[in-house]
Amino acid sequence: MCRNIKTLFNFEPPASELEIRDAALQFVRKLSGFNVPSKANEEAFDRAVVEVAASARTLMQALVTNASPRNRELEAAKARAASLARFGGHPISEK
């Protein structure tokens, strides 16, 4: 559904407030169909982002795991490798 929303739980360092807000914004955009809401819908849209972010924060604080925290750099490298395998890659020429 929301391919741009990344897993935020069980990372070291923990997800930042900005990462949580960005995920909430992406989720609300997907649900509403608006990238940027109209003035008439702006208040409801912004309130939804705040509420979703608060719910996400509450969820992540309540979750428990015995797994060791994941490394952000390693996970990003895995994602790049998977993307390269899926879509192929073209070297970017430097100017």
Image (cartoon, rainbow, N blue to C red):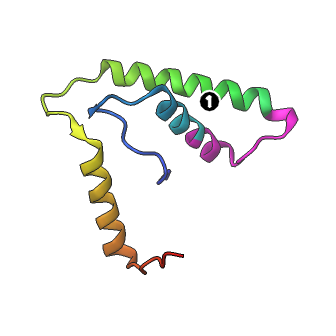
Q: Relative to residue 24, is residue 92 drawn left or right?
A: left
Task: From the viewer's side, name the closer residue of 37 and 71.
Answer: 71
Task: From the viewer's side, name the closer residue of 19 and 39.
Answer: 19
Q: Relative to residue 34, is residue 78 drawn left or right?
A: left
Q: Where is residue 47 in the image (x, y as percent from the top left)?
A: 68, 24
Mark 1 element type: helix
Q: Where is residue 37 in the image (x, y as percent from the top left)?
A: 78, 41
- The residue that appears at 60% across and 47% down in the rendered structure is 30
Please state the extent of the stretch shown in magenta in the rendering. Answer: 26-41
Q: Which residue lies furthest to the right in this view?
A: 40
Q: Residue furthest front?
A: 95
Dominant SS of magenta comes to: helix
Amino acid type, mark 1: Val
Locate the C terminus by quadrant. bottom right
Residue 69, by quadrant, is top left
- The residue that appears at 46% across and 76% down in the rendered structure is 92
- The residue that appears at 70% across and 48% down in the rendered structure is 35
Q: Relative to residue 47, is residue 59 drawn left or right?
A: left
Q: Circle 1 is placed at which residue position?
A: 49
Report if residue 18 lies within the magenta region: no
